[in-house]
Amino acid sequence: MTPVQAILFDYGMVLSAPPDPAAWQRMRTISGLSEDLLHREYWAHRHDYDRGDLNAQAFWNKTAAAAGIVLTPAQLAALIEADTDLWAQLNPPMIDWVQRLQRAGIRTGILSNMPDAMETGLRARHPWIESFDHHTWSHALNLAKPEPEIYRHAAEGLATPPENILFIDDRAENIAAALSIGMQAIQYTDHATFEQEMRARGLAHLLQLQGSTDSQIGTI
């Protein structure tokens, strides 16, 4: 079996919990969009926003334009904050495992499709993000999963051959792209199933790591 020397994490739905319904409702209230329109327009433009083809202002103006709404600067700022809150709740067992890996000296990275304003907001809320050895943010590269080049960038940033990297993501197409460049990969659905898959692959030793208690790791 090829040894795992570094672990690369998606952010949304892996390090984070599912989207916060209260934050979504705030976006509806702030924007004045109906549920159907907000859902349609948010996701219609979100990939371009993640990829850096749109900045926050352009993304939200395009989203609101579907209903003929012109956003004020105050509305724009409030929408950016609510959108960050949408993805700010965490997945505690995964964060705990990340920190145990880091204390044990295992290299860790984040590879996330994430727009500029959200990266800024989440890093301000969650200091533990700085503890990863490398961050690959889609907007900064004008690339997004499942484009193969973004995976290669993450591997180079971790200074680890792709075959020695375990990538964890919740989306099947992103897992397939990681496998296509030679990474090991597991699709994340829930933590119990993830740990079962790790054991099935002979990676239980990584789940059992404790590491030194002397390391200064960011906390939730």
Image (tube, helix red, strand yellow):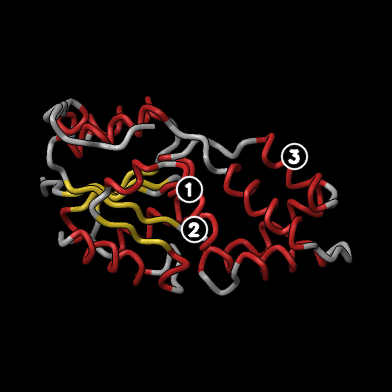
Of the image marks 2 and 3, the number of the one nearer the N terminus:
3
* The C terminus sits in image quarter: top left
Please provide percent x and percent y for residue 213. Answer: 15, 27
Which mark, by number, is residue 122?
Answer: 1
Which mark, by number, is residue 114?
Answer: 2
Q: Residue at x 29, y 50 (%)?
A: 8
Please provide percent x and percent y for residue 99. Answer: 26, 35
Name the kind of residue labelled 2 in the image: Met
Disc 2 to disc 1: CB gap under 8 Å? yes
Please provide percent x and percent y for residue 101. Answer: 20, 37
Q: Secondary structure at mark 3?
A: helix
Q: Is residue 80 positioned above or below 139 on the image? A: above
- Residue 202 appears in the picture as rendered: no
Q: Residue at x 62, y 64 (%)?
A: 56
Q: Looking at this view, is 219 or 13 the one in front? A: 219
Name the kind of residue labelled 1 in the image: Leu
Q: Secondary structure at mark 1?
A: helix
User: Is 119 on the left or on the right of 152, as rendered?
Assistant: right
User: Is 22 on the left or on the right of 152, as rendered?
Assistant: right
Q: Looking at this view, is 31 or 125 the one in front? A: 125
Q: Is residue 90 positioned above or below 168 on the image? A: above
Q: Is residue 188 positioned above or below 73 on the image? A: above
Name the kind of residue labelled 3 in the image: Gln
* Count of numbered badges drawn on the protein: 3
Q: Quadrant of residue 196?
A: top left
- Residue 51 appears in the picture as rendered: yes
